Image (tube, grey):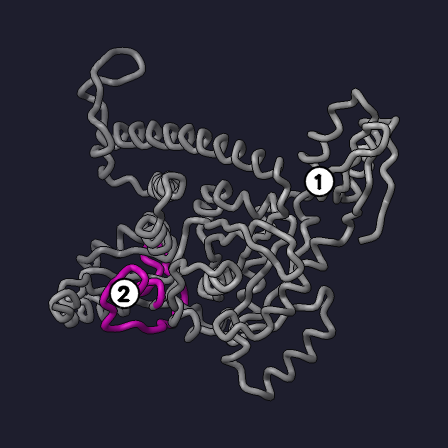
Amino acid sequence: MNQSSETDKTRALVIVPVNKGKVGRDPLVRLEEARGLALALDLDVPEARVVTLRKAQASTLIGKGLIDDLRLELRHHGAELLIVDAKLTPVQQRNLEKALDAKVIDRTGVILEIFGLRARTKEGRLQVELALLTYERSRLVRTWTHLERQRGGKGFLAGPGERQLETDRRLLEQRITRLRKALDNVRRTRGLHRSARQRVPYPIIALVGYTNAGKSTLFNTLCGTDMLAEDMLFATLDPAMRLITMEKGREAILSDTVGFISDLPTELIAAFRATLEEVLEADLIIHVRDIASKQSAEQRDDVNSILEQLLSAQEKGIPVLEVWNKIDLVADDEAERLQGLAQSITPKPVLLSAVTKQGMATLSQRVESILSEGMHTVRITIPIGEGRVHPWVCRNGKLLDTQSDENGQQILVAQLDNKNLGALEAAFPGITPERISV
């Protein structure tokens, strides 16, 4: 049965073009990642290799000699798909398909295909489709008439003489417009959910990281859940959120987000901004790194670059804690070196293994410490007849206790940060919060 299903898989060759003399990522690491992307699509990959380009060709990216070799290799392996780990222009893609008599897909197309297969929520599917249509808009080759039938009418719709490509483009634009409206509705719903969470003000901790860095495994360890966590690129796409309780009893909402990757398509960064809104609203971002990877530093830079694109100037004030995961896969002498390196970095990273749970207690302590910075425990005496203070504190802080004094005045014990402490005094001039130690 397994043998049959293996035979039924689409066969694909994978090439990683590298410009001769140009310094960049390790080509073998790029090749491993490109092969991983193909396997994530459940493709059979009989051959994957790095190809060196003396000069990129405007019409096909690769030269005629290599095209001839690839045509023979595709036939030899019975492959019907070529994956090019680079960004192809629409012209290059079409020319390669004609020359090879095979389907050609570039890195952006592969990632979009994976997202299309893995998205499970309504929002995820809408975002993937929007990203895919935005990507395909410049690659129209009379393939979009399946979106809907052409309507009859006069004025803004042309008659039967209209060119097919123009019809396709109009249908595509209409579909994109509908998707954007649907996503706006989803975002409004998410906004209502977020407002509800703010009324029960648990801090939000967002996990981010390069795909396959171990975010989902760490999420499962912290939450005690069994969400899918496989050694596969983009094993999970849709964000997951759970309420967790830390060692000292503090509660927080933990959010696991989609993994990042180098050269993430700009169409996806724009489309998935809504999915990543939990990052934008977070009180703490935990950046999970695969410290056992030879490309850990480059992966860190990729994640930071995407966060730079996502976060506004105001949102860039969110504290970021690096977690160096998979320390159990590192040799003892390298682990010792990393421990010394971590001591020299501010804020100091946490070295751990989400699988063996080594370092998890340290992570919990650091998270609680960061979340407690700037928080003040105060006693607030509310005069009789002033009913607005209690709900205001519940919306903007954490209510710890409610008491009454001998005069019947309500006394609240709450935690407020610096911003909301000042806002409370400004909103209710007659009330002076008394700071207390706990």
Answer with the quarter of the image where residue 126 lies: top left
Camera-nearest label, 2 or 1: 1
Tag 2: amino acid: Lys
Residue 404 horizontal side relative to residue 183, left or right:
right
Residue 371 lies, in percent from the top left, at 69, 53
Tag 1: amino acid: Gly
Residue 272 horizontal side relative to residue 128, left or right:
right
Residue 30 seen anywhere in this rendered image of the structure:
yes
Task: Identify the magenta region.
Answer: 36-64
Residue 348 horizontal side relative to residue 69, left or right:
right
* Residue at 25%, 18% in the rendered image: 158
User: Which residue is label 1 attached to?
Assistant: 397
* Residue at 79%, 35% in the rendered image: 411
Say if the magenta span includes residue 52. yes
* Residue at 41%, 65% in the rendered image: 55
* Residue at 50%, 30% in the rendered image: 188
Q: Residues within 10 Å of mark 1 (few under 14, many from 20)?
A: many
- Label 1: which secondary element: loop
- Label 2: which secondary element: helix
Say if the magenta span includes residue 346. no
- Asked if 13 appears above or below 413 in the picture, the reply is below
Residue 26 lies, in percent from the top left, at 47, 74
Q: Nearer the viewer, residue 99 or 212?
A: 212
User: Which residue is label 2 attached to?
Assistant: 64
Residue 347 lies, in percent from the top left, at 72, 64
- Asked if 235 appears above or below 171 in the picture, the reply is below
Q: Nearer the viewer, residue 305 or 333?
A: 333
Question: Is the N terminus in the top left, top right, bottom left or bottom right quadrant?
Answer: bottom left
- Asked if 65 appears above or below 422 in the picture, the reply is below
Q: Nearer the viewer, residue 285 or 169?
A: 285
